[in-house]
Amino acid sequence: MRKIKKKQTYNADYRRDYYRKNREKILAYQAHYFERNAEKMREYWRERNELRKIKRGGAMPKLKIERTEYVRKLFKFDAKLLREMEHICALKGITLNKFVDICVRYALSNIDTSSPEEER
């Protein structure tokens, strides 16, 4: 048992001396590490505190869900065009509705908005 106590004392002395000698380096590293990971640490502690509140019987935080408003419209497509669109949707793994939405958004963002009178 004496050997263990001496070893523990030695380790404690060694650690204390090492810290005293290298205090500035250690503090500089800790500051650098904290700056680099500060936002991750803050987020971790926020989530941890929220979970603790819930476990203690606190109210569950409300989920903020952004909803997009949709309107139903009926469109007619040429049968050949519709088959092509369905084929592309199957290849990409998206729904036909999503595909039409993407195409219309692309067309609207790239349309020439100059009036026909100016072209003449």
Image: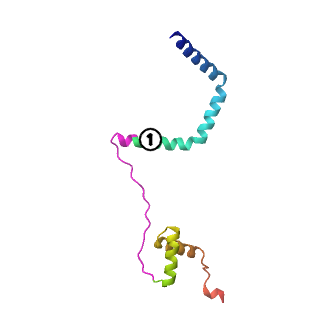
Q: Nearer the viewer, residue 107 or 76?
A: 76
Q: Residue at x 63, y 19 (%)?
A: 17
Image quadrant assignment for residue 55: top left
Residue holding disc 1: 48
Closer to us: 59 or 103: 103
Is 56 colored magenta in this rendering? yes
Identify the residue at image location x=65%, y=87%.
119
Q: Residue at x 62, y 30 (%)?
A: 27
Q: Position of residue 89 (x, y in %)?
A: 50, 72
Residue 70 counted in the magenta span: yes
Estimate the x, y position of residue 51 in percent, counting from the top left.
Answer: 40, 42
Please identify the dominant SS of the magenta region.
Answer: loop
Q: Is residue 96 left or right of residue 114?
A: left
Amino acid type for the residue under numbered disc 1: Arg
Query: Which residues, given as a range, are shown in magenta?
Result: 52-75
Q: Is residue 103 above or below residue 47?
A: below
Image quarter where the C terminus lies is bottom right
Above or below, comparing residue 120 to residue 20 in the picture: below
Residue at 44% across / 41% down in the picture? 48
Which residue ends up furthest to the bottom in the rendered image? Answer: 120
Q: Position of residue 85 (x, y in %)?
A: 51, 77
Crowding near pointer 1: few (<14 within 10 Å), some, many (20+)? few
